[in-house]
Image: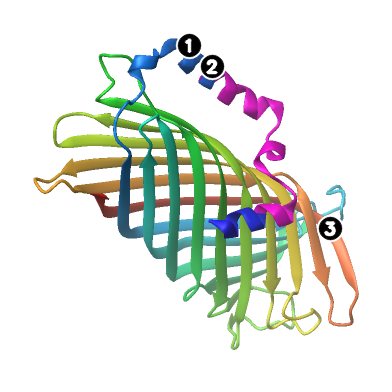
Amino acid sequence: MSVIFQAISRSGCWPSACFSAGLLAPLLALLTAMQSAVAVGDSLARADRFRALYGFGYRQDQLDWNIAADPSGTATPNVLSELTWSDMDIYEGALDLYWTAGNGLYLHSAISYGVVTDGQVQDSDYSSDGRQGEYSRSENGADGDRVFDASFAVGRQWGLGPQFAEHLRISPVIGVATHRQRFNITDGVQTIATAGVPLGPFLGLDSQYDAQWNGAFVGLDLEWQLSGALAVLAAYQLHRVDYEAEANWNLRTDLAHPVSFAHDAEGSGDVFSLKLAYRSQYGWEWLLVADYQNWETDPGRAYTFASDGSSSLTRLNAVHWDTWSLSFGVLLPY
């Protein structure tokens, strides 16, 4: 996971600095409450336990961003240009590693990689506030690119009291994560245009948008053994991130290449995960996994780089990213 720490280091945002007092307070309060409520004898006094989850499944992403006409966001139009990637079909593989020490120390690392097979992209430009006066729109395709996610978390695992010690385990965690989407734009079709610009398909479109969300999070992992063979694993993470993106608009001769413009902002994200596990007679478990994530940035900066070497700055109004996935996996003890 050194790549995660290098990314966070380059952004100047380590876990202790990424969270405001408002974010740290709930974690500290939870840790204090659990230490008070859970007796020493209820901590998971058992041998070290290491498990690996191998998964594969389907994921769908939506990413959109828009910029204003000036750095303040008050000039007309307040939304100058907007890009939306929707219905992004992705097939991904994932590896989760869980390690629990006999004294309750808990580590969870995760990594996944996915390939984009299909998607839709809309590029719209406006002349008036409130997305009015749309004078240009292209409706395009997206395929052949990729997504990557990695995280590392550390915490303490407890059984909640003598009655549940062997059946319900909860692990408050803190960690770092990186998420990357490399989305392209292909198969261009102009559907709204000003006079002199032809409508219909146009050739040669192969633009790229490369986005990264790097930061730290607090969260909870929960494991509930419903029966001897059936268990539920759930997790929630609250992230605070630095967002950075670069784009190459390949058909724009007035823009620089390979970096035509760049975005940066701060943001946050919510990550939810639910796993249903069924233990086989051989000791390993089949899993059905459902994940959902919702991310959004604060207003940030959008830099445009011209082919003559000049550059300009305007306001990045917001970036939104939603993703859900459904996958199957096998959890192996070691």
Q: Amino acid at mark 3?
A: Thr
Residue at 56% in and 25% down: 27
- Mostly what secondary structure, the magenta segment? helix
Query: Is 118 on the left or on the right of 58, as rendered?
Result: right
Residue range in magenta is 8-30
Query: Is 324 on the left or on the right of 327, as rendered?
Result: right
Mark 3 to mark 1 CA distance (whole Å) = 51 Å
Residue at 50% in and 57% down: 149
Q: Amino acid at mark 2?
A: Thr
Q: Quadrant of residue 41?
A: top left
Q: Amino acid at mark 1?
A: Ser
Tell whether label 2 touches label 1 (CB within 8 Å). yes
The relative height of residue 303 versus residue 206 in the rendered view (above or below) is above
| The one of 12 and 321 positioned closer to us in this rendering | 12
User: Is residue 18 rendered magenta in the image?
Assistant: yes
Which residue corresponds to mark 3? Answer: 314
Mark 1 to mark 2 CA distance (whole Å) = 6 Å
Residue at 55% in and 63% down: 181
Query: Is 109 on the left or on the right of 140, as rendered?
Result: left
| The one of 16 and 328 positioned closer to us in this rendering | 16
